[in-house]
Amino acid sequence: MENVSELEREKRLRTVPTDLPTSLGNVVEYRKSGLSLNHVVGCPLDCGYCVRHMFDNFAMKRPHLVVDDERAVAELMAHWAFVPHVTPIQIFNRATDPFLPLVKEHMAHSLELLDAHGLTNHVLIITRWKVLRDDIERLEQLRHLKVSVLVTWSGITDARLEPIDSAIAERSLEVLADRARRTRKIMYWRPIIAGVNDTDECIDRASALSHYADATVFTGLFHREQIRAHFRSSGVEDLYGDVHRRKILPRKVEQNILRRYNGVPIFRKTSCGIAFAYAEADYNGHFGIRNICDICPPNQVRICGTSHQAPSRAKLSSLAETVGLDPSRIEVSAGKVIVEDSTEQQRYFLQHVLGFQVHDRALPHLPERHGRAEEGWN
Ligand code: SF4
């Protein structure tokens, strides 16, 4: 990769230009898998389906530093939603890859700063780039944080969709299997696209590779307006009929994968893969949506079942007031809390603190669809 080699020749990251969109200037953001720390933005890897299309950042090929690590970590810990030892954290999962040259120094240093506070929060590091022995050795020195490296692998060979060779992720998984001990490793199989990388050969390859990991998580494609527009401009025929808010993974594709896959335990949800890797309950409380668990190993189902408990009215009311939701419009239903007129951030906070699913009445999760877009499920 031309741009990565250029990066390797630099001594340090440049700082961001002054016209950075405001959305990227906010280095801490609350997402479903936790508080996301993003004080490096820009990426040379050019994955066609990258969420950077949605932040107007796809053209920034060189990673840039927004603020230094000390300030970023301080902002994370001061964030209204940060709960020590509880809130899951992700680093550099929005607009760069954490294992790129120079970027990885900031990733490791930021985690060391957090670890020095004795924090035991989960940290998710998602990459499709090269994970080297030295990188793992450094992560292994952390003493408190529960770190998981999720290696994105797709098996896609069409460079218009993904120019990066999947062999890079395969090698990263191998190195992790060889060196990681306290660091957990997840085979992050995505984006699975109907008719592109859902063949029996892909499933067999994913099964084989999964043995380098503690767990596999599989998921589909974000087919948002900006991503479809990018594919169209690259000459790719529309991959799906429509754009959707949620990821697309048609029922038939999922069924075929689950029939054929024969690797380590496989999960529909990222947090479930993490839960299994640490033998603890899912911090997103997916156990409440029981059909998500039909592929989960019995021992893990027991672990989640034991800690699954509907929150008390008093606790809900107090948390609702913390995030500015009207407690009188909150309902505890089977396996989930239902709120109204909420933002994603409000729901994620409740969900992570309670370890219990929280849905908005206006955005229902339909039975057996596992939170996916309707495409392919009608
Ligand atoms: S039991 Fe259900 S919620 Fe828990 S890890 Fe398994 S799939 Fe996820």
Image (tube, rainbow, N blue to C red):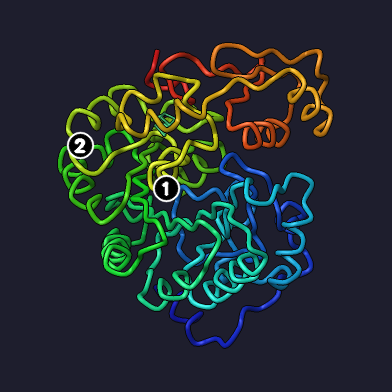
Above or below 19: residue 265: above
Residue ID for mark 1? 278
Relative to 321, is 235 on the left or the right? Answer: left
- Tag shown at residue 261: 2
Report the amino acid beneath label 2.
Answer: Tyr
Residue at figure coordinates x 73%, y 15% from the top left:
330
Label 2, secondary structure: give it. Answer: loop
Task: Report which quarter residue 162 is drawn in.
Answer: bottom left
Q: Which is more foreground, mark 2 or mark 1?
A: 1
Residue 65 at what x, y percent from top left? 67, 71
Residue 129 at what x, y percent from top left? 40, 65
Identify the image quadrant of the N terminus.
bottom left
Residue at figure coordinates x 55%, y 76% from the top left:
105
Report the amino acid beneath label 1.
Answer: Tyr
Q: Quadrant of ligand 1?
A: top left
- Tag shown at residue 41: none
Q: Is residue 23 visible?
A: yes
Label 1, secondary structure: give it. Answer: helix
Contact (CB < 8 A) between labels 2 and 1?
no
Q: Residues within 10 Å of mark 1 (few under 14, many from 20)?
A: some
Count the labels in the image.
2
Relative to 93, is 327 on the left or the right? Answer: right
Task: Report which quarter residue 275 is drawn in.
Answer: top left
